[in-house]
Amino acid sequence: MASPDAEPTLDSADPAEQFAAYLDHYRAVVARKLDGLTGDQLRSSVLPSGWTPLELLTHLVHMERRWFVWGFLGEQVAHPWGDNVDDAPGGRWHVSDDVTLVDLVAALHDGGTRTRDILASHDLAERAAVGGRFAPGGDNPPTLLWICFHVLQEYARHTGHLDVVRELADGETGE
């Protein structure tokens, strides 16, 4: 039996389908890595940088929405930088006391559903819309392909961070 953290077995010639499978995989791995941590462990840091597991999770939720919905589709979204204290790029990650792990994992998977729909209905060579994240008259907006690679590397990097945090918090390790 394959490890629950094993990479997807889908081997498709359709790159959009492959991206969707890998993004689904990373969302599931992130949720598994946080499952079993106590409330205190979710809201406290074991790292010198000071970020907490819930802060990283809210960052992933907002990051994916920023790139696919606000960025690629150009839709207006409430608080696109809502993972940051000042709702501005580069700010410190923040999670309100009333937000729970269950809330954030649900938001993570809801965002994934939206991303999957976008990938199923747009060509990867299509450029992001202007009017959302990308201002009219600015630099050439990125392609959906570039956005997919960017979001995938964000998930891969931060999942690795969670590996370390989980091991420091309670000794659990992934494979």
Image (spheres, rainbow, N blue to C red):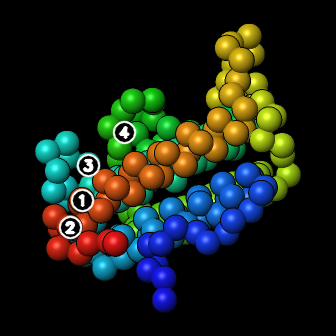
Q: Residue type at mark 4?
A: Val
Q: Nearer the viewer, mark 4 or mark 1?
A: 1
Question: Where is mark 3, residue-wise?
Answer: 51
Identity of the residue drawn at 83% across and 43% down: 123
Q: Nearer the viewer, mark 4 or mark 2?
A: 2
Please identify the quarter of the rendering in which residue 164 is found: bottom left
Of the two numbered discs 4 and 1 on the same chain, state the one appearing first in sequence.
4
Of the two numbered discs 4 and 2 on the same chain, state the one appearing first in sequence.
4
Q: Residue type at mark 3?
A: Trp
Residue density around tag 3, few if under 14, some if 14–19, many if 20 or more, within 10 Å: some
Left or right: residue 142 compared with residue 96? right
Q: Looking at the figure, which quarter contains the C terminus?
A: bottom left
Residue at the extreme bottom of the image, as rendered: 1
Question: Where is mark 1, residue-wise?
Answer: 164
Rendering coords of residue 170 (x, y %): 17, 73
Question: Where is mark 2, residue-wise?
Answer: 167
Q: CA distance from mark 4 to mark 3?
A: 12 Å
The label number, if any, that marks residue 47 in the structure image: none
